[in-house]
């Protein structure tokens, strides 16, 4: 995410304001307009009403501080932290009308609307993500405590041989503080002949991808000879690529033949390596997979869309977008409960997954809104697929305490636009992923205006 902040106001013309208002009112993301000096809420969309549980008139009579549960000094601290980290969003706890507290991510930009300066904010509920992150943080802390509690010398080096971690036992053995070790290489910490040996051992581990076990004999000048048992093993990053070496060693001068101890320590190292890789995989999955439906998250969907769009623009095959959402989704949640709503979304995802190709990209765009990217497919070729999905979803029945529930979808289709400069006689504004999604969104809006339960292909005016 590009988190570079800007204080430049965005002026919205009267023509653009109609589009802005249509998106503002109809979008499933929570949006509101704020008076910058006082924090008064000037306007909200229906998604905000649904999320916070207040009526629109009530929300528009409130101030942000009545919803944000942080004390003013902590709000200021969060804003300063965001400025320091060069990100354009803030993370706050918001209290809903029913008293429940949710963690939200607030993206704000100053805009000029009807010649008045206001603050436009988009709010995303990240409570579940934050809870998962806290669980992951606790897991990492437990892993760190485990490493520090072991009586062995443990360290990690990156692929260039620089130390990235050392436990307190290693620091004590070397007679150095952690900050004197991290970032350094063996050549900066040890005599040349030892450093060269350690470097070659690390190189062998990285080249072969295998764990090695060594017994090293050392006799510093003027001191007694001693032996250490050494295990070095590669560890991988979240992409499965070798990221460096994990090392563990301990003094076996008095216990050189104790194979039981060797076996025990090897198991500990392997367990630590598995824990580290599991944490990395968990973190990657959190960022890419929607917890409810198991398909791509909005962020990962946008990343994949950018790639597919660039391929389509460069090589000029068609790329189509199928955008759809559930008709009367709020009414379904209000009538049957959110658990039934979640079950319904899962059923829809299963139907779509069974219909699309392996090369197609499917993701949850937000709430009950979904997007399918179809490479090398025109809008007209997508239409039969959309009609099959629409029909199969319409035949889906979900049994509830209040009787069977049937649902319908509204669908919009759009495809990339390839301009012929010679034919036009001028250089047009280039197409973009945002434009492609906006066209699909307009087609979806038209489908809803046409009575829902239908598919519309975007047509240029």
Image (spheres, rainbow, N blue to C red):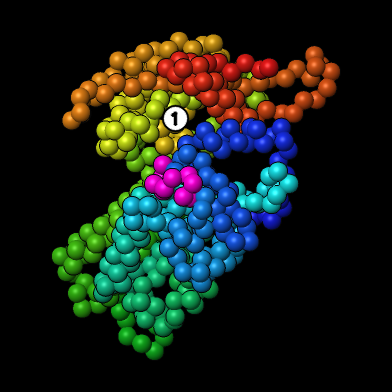
Q: Position of residue 259 (x, y in %)?
A: 17, 65
Residue at horizontal 38 percent and vertical 34 percent from the top: 330
Which quarter of the rendered picture does the C terminus lie within?
Answer: top right
Residue, x 65% and y 25% (percent of image)?
Answer: 313
Total numbered labels: 1
Looking at the image, which is closer to me, 205 or 424? 424
Boundaries of the magenta span: 50-59
* Mark 1 neighbour class, 10 Å CA radius: few under 14, some 14 to 19, many 20 or more: many
Is residue 343 in sight in this rendering? yes
Q: Quadrant of residue 332?
A: top left
Q: Is residue 10 above or below residue 67?
A: above
Q: Residue furthest right?
A: 425
Indicate left or right for 235 with 188 as reference.
left
- 6 is within the stretch colored magenta: no
- The residue lying toward the viewer, choosing from 158 and 74, is 74
- Residue visible at 57% across and 29% down? 437
Please provide percent x and percent y for residue 269.
28, 60
Q: Name which residue lies at 38% across and 52% down.
A: 96
Frontmost residue, 173 versus 47 = 47
Q: Which percent across, then down, holds residue 428?
A: 77, 25
Residue 54 highlighted magenta (yes or no): yes
Name above or below for residue 181 compared with residue 293: below
User: Magenta stretch: dominant SS?
Assistant: helix
What is the secondary structure assignment of the residue under circle 1?
strand
Camera sees residue 217: no
Residue 100 appears at what percent x and percent y?
Answer: 33, 54
In-front residue for pair 24/145: 24
Q: Which residue occupies the extreme bottom position in the image?
A: 222
* Residue that mark 1 sits on: 370
């Amino acid at each position: 995410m590009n988190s570079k902040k800007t204080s430049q106001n965005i002026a919205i013309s009267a023509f653009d304001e109609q589009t802005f208002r249509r998106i503002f009112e109809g979008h499933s993301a929570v949006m509101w307009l704020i008076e910058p000096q006082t924090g008064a809420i000037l306007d909200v969309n229906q998604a905000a009403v649904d999320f916070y549980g207040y009526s629109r008139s009530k929300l528009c009579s409130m101030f942000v501080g009545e919803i944000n549960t942080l004390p003013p000094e902590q709000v200021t601290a969060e804003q300063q932290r965001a400025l320091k980290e060069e990100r354009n969003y803030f993370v706050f706890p918001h209290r809903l009308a029913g008293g429940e507290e949710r963690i939200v991510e607030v993206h704000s930009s100053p805009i000029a609307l009807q010649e008045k300066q206001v603050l436009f904010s988009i709010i995303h509920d990240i409570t579940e993500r934050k809870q998962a992150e806290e669980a992951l943080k606790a897991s990492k802390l437990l892993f760190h405590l485990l490493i520090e509690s072991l009586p062995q010398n443990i360290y990690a080096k990156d692929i260039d041989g620089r130390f990235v971690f050392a436990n307190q036992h290693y620091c004590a053995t070397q007679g150095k503080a952690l900050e004197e070790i991290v970032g350094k290489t063996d050549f900066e910490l040890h005599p040349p002949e030892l450093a060269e040996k350690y470097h070659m051992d690390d190189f062998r581990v990285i080249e072969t991808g295998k764990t090695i076990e060594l017994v090293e004999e050392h006799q510093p000048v003027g001191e007694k000879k001693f032996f250490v048992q050494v295990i070095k093993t590669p560890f991988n990053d979240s992409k499965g690529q070798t990221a460096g070496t994990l090392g563990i060693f301990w003094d076996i001068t008095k216990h050189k033949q104790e194979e039981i101890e060797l076996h025990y320590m090897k198991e500990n190292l392997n367990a630590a390596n598995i824990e580290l890789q599991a944490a990395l995989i968990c973190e990657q999955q959190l960022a890419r997979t929607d917890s409810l439906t198991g398909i791509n998250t909005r962020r990962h969907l946008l990343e994949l869309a950018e790639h597919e769009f660039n391929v389509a623009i460069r090589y000029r095959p068609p790329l189509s977008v199928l955008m759809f959402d559930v008709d009367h989704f709020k009414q379904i949640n209000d009538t049957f409960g959110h658990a039934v709503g979640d079950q319904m979304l899962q059923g829809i995802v299963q139907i779509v997954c069974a219909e699309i190709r392996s090369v197609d990209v499917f993701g949850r765009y937000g709430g009950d809104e979904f997007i399918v990217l179809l490479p090398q497919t025109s809008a007209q070729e997508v239409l039969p697929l959309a009609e099959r999905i629409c029909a199969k979803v319409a035949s889906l029945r979900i049994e509830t305490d209040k009787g069977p529930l049937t649902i319908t979808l509204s669908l919009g289709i759009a495809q990339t636009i390839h301009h012929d400069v010679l034919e036009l006689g001028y250089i047009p504004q280039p197409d973009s992923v945002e434009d492609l999604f906006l066209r699909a969104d307009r087609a979806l809006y038209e489908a809803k205006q046409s009575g829902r339960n239908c598919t519309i292909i975007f047509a240029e005016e």
